[in-house]
Image (cartoon, rainbow, N blue to C red):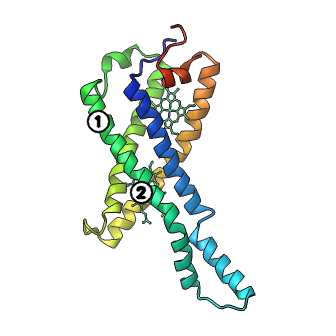
Amino acid sequence: MTLKTYSAQFRLWHWLNAIAILGLLGTVLLRKTFLSYKTNSSVLVEELSKLDITIALEDAKTIAKVIRAPMWEWHYIFGWALVVLFACRIVLHIKDRPFFSLKEFRRLTTHHKGTQSLYTILYVLISVMVVTGVMLYFKQDLGLSKELSHDIKEFHEILMYVFAFFVPIHILSAFIAENKGEPGLVSNMISGKKNSE
Ligand code: HEM
Ligand code: HEM
C-alpha cells in the first residue's frame, strides 16, 4: 500500500492539532474527576466539619470552583490554539491542496475510503467545536440567553465524547496499521519519508 504524501506544513499541523485536542480532553478529564466541584465541595464540608468548622455547601462549591479555575484556563488556551490551527488549515487548503479531491478519493482502497470519510467527519466536528466553543466564550458579548447557552454547552459537551472515542481508536489503529500492512505509516506522518525511500 502506497502511503499518502503529507507536506511539512500538514504534518506539523497534524501534531499541533493532536496536542491541542489532547490538551482539551485533558482539561475536561480533570474537570470531571480530580477537580470536580461537586466532589471537592463535599470533601471541603466533610473535612472542615472534622475540625468543627461548619461551611454551607454553596460556599464550599464556590471555593471548589475557585480551585478549579486556573486549570480550566487551559481549556481556553488549548481552545484558542485549536481556533488558530483551524484557520491555518483553511489557509493551507486554499494555498496548497484542495479541500477534497474526488480523483484522489476514487483511487483509494475501500478501507481507506472508509478512514478518509471518518477523518472528514472529524474535521466537520472540529469546526463545530470551534464555533460552539467561541460562542460559549463570548456568550455575554453575544447576548445569548441562558437557555440557548445551556443548549450550546450541552451540544459542545456531547460532541466531546466523539473525540474521547476517536483519539484512543485512532492511536490504536495507527499502531496496528504500522505493524500490519502499512509499515512506516507513523514515521511518514513525522518525517514525510515513505519507507521505500
Ligand atoms: C490525539 C489527537 C489526534 C488527532 C485529533 C489526530 C487526527 C488525525 C487526522 C484528522 C488525520 C487524517 C489526516 C488526513 O486528513 O489525511 C490523522 C492522520 C494520522 N494520524 Fe493522527 N491524530 C491524533 C493523534 C495521533 C497520534 C498520537 C498518532 C501516532 C500514533 C497519529 C498518527 C497518525 C497517522 C500515522 C496518520 C496518517 C494516516 C493515514 O495516512 O491514513 N495521530 N490524524
Ligand atoms: C475538541 C475540542 C473541545 C472539546 C473536547 C471541548 C470540551 C468541552 C466540554 C466537555 C465542556 C463542558 C464542561 C462541563 O461543563 O463539564 C466545554 C465547555 C466549554 N468549552 Fe470546550 N471543548 C473543545 C473546544 C473548545 C474551543 C475551541 C473553545 C473556544 C475557545 C472552547 C470553549 C469552551 C467554553 C467557553 C466552555 C464553557 C465553560 C463553562 O461554562 O464553564 N472549547 N468544552
Is residue 90 visible in the rendered image? The answer is yes
Residue in the image at 49% along x and 12% along y: 2
Q: In this view, does 97 lie above or below 147?
A: above
* First in sequence: mark 2 vs mark 1: 2
Q: Residue 91: x percent and y percent?
A: 27, 34
Question: Which of the 4 image quarters holds residue 89?
Answer: top left
Q: Is mark 2 within 8 Å of ligand 2?
A: yes
Q: Is residue 131 above or below residue 188?
A: below
Q: Which numbered marker is on residue 90?
A: 1
Q: Which of marks 2 and 1 is in front?
A: 2
Residue in the image at 55% along x and 62% along y: 31
Rendered-image quarter of ligand 2: bottom left
Residue type at tag 2:
Tyr
In this figure, which residue is indicated by the disc labeled 2?
76
Q: SS class of the residue under badge 1?
A: helix
In the rendered structure, are the residues bearing label 2 and label 1 in contact, judged by CB atoms less than 8 Å apart?
Answer: no
Residue type at tag 1:
Ile
Q: Residues within 10 Å of mark 2 (few under 14, many from 20)?
A: some
